[in-house]
Image (cartoon, rainbow, N blue to C red):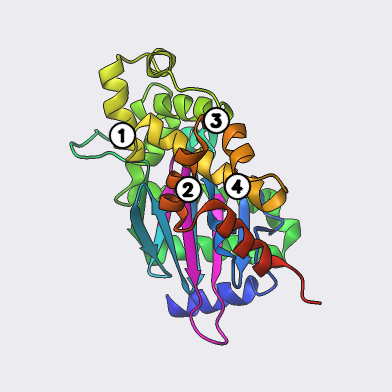
Amino acid sequence: MQTMLEEMRRLTAHAENRPTETGIPGILMVKGEIPEHKLGAVYEPMVNLILDGSKTLTIAGQDYYYDPASYFVISIDVPATGTVQQAGPDRPYIGVSLSLDPARIAALLLDLPPQSYQEGQSGGYSVCRMTPQLLDAWLRMLQLMERSQDIPALAPAYEREILYRVLQGPQGWMLRDIAAPDSALSRIRLAIRWVREHYAEAVEVEKLAALTAMSVSAFHRHFKAVTAMSPIQFQKSIRLLQARQLLISQSGNASSVAYSVGYESASQFTREYARFFGRPPARDASLIRENIRPAA
């Protein structure tokens, strides 16, 4: 697998330290040092592969570490913070990702035998061990960057193979649930989407349960199983991530930002912000602005 990784690193050498287009639909790449505040975001469904270095995502207080020996599957929109680690002085972090499209997964499932659900399968994200077959499919996908004329014909086939290999892996059931409109995961995604779009509003669990066609108790149970958070904790994470972006980009003080993202108490906002990011709001924003300020 090392030879394949070296070729993929060569292919992605021109990536920047932000999500960079590859010319292949649904495929992004990134390379180099990434500021910690840029990694704090709501991550959307994807398969994320590390080509060099490593990455740690923190979701609901739990750290998920992965490197070229593994890959990360996210099947829901989920708020997270993270860090990337360089492989060495002359070996920057490199990562690539494939956005997950439920329609494409559903089309693939039509050609596969049904698979029964097994007890203990829950959660909306997981680290999985890389296989030579999956890495080979990724290599052929990335090689299309040097043969752009082949992208329309071959990218869909290679994407289908990547999805197939992930479906064969230990967390393949998550992709199946993405494509099944009546699955608990798909219904919880409706509630997640509502919270993302209305994060500054009060969460009414009864309404979210009705949106997912579940009882309140079943909704709570499935939401926690998928996200590892309660609906209130999930909303709080989104509010804090949004508040951080506002503090960095605007001149407003912490109190005004707190109210704009839905907090009713500025002191509560300050406490929860410091617990989530490790620093109080004003100090955190000041340090980030200082680090991203262009050199004179």
Residue at 48 percent of width and 58 percent of height: 279
Residue furthest front as drawn: 267
Q: Mark 4 points at which residue?
A: 156
N-terminal label among 3 and 1: 1
Q: Quadrant of residue 121?
A: top left
**Alpha-carbon distance for marks 3 and 4?**
42 Å
Residue 169, above or below 227: below
What residue would you read off at disc 3? 262
Judging by the rendered image, the residue that carries numbered circle 1 is 224
User: Whole-percent x and y of residue 158?
Assistant: 55, 53
Using the rendered image of the protein, determine whether residue 130 is visible from the camera's viewpoint.
Answer: no
The residue identified by callout 2 is 273
Q: In this view, does 76 lie above or below 163?
A: above
Magenta region, residue range: 72-98
Q: Which residue is drawn at 60% across and 64% down?
A: 287
Q: Which numbered disc flags the more N-terminal residue, 2 or 4?
A: 4
Q: Distance between the residues labelled 2 and 4?
A: 42 Å
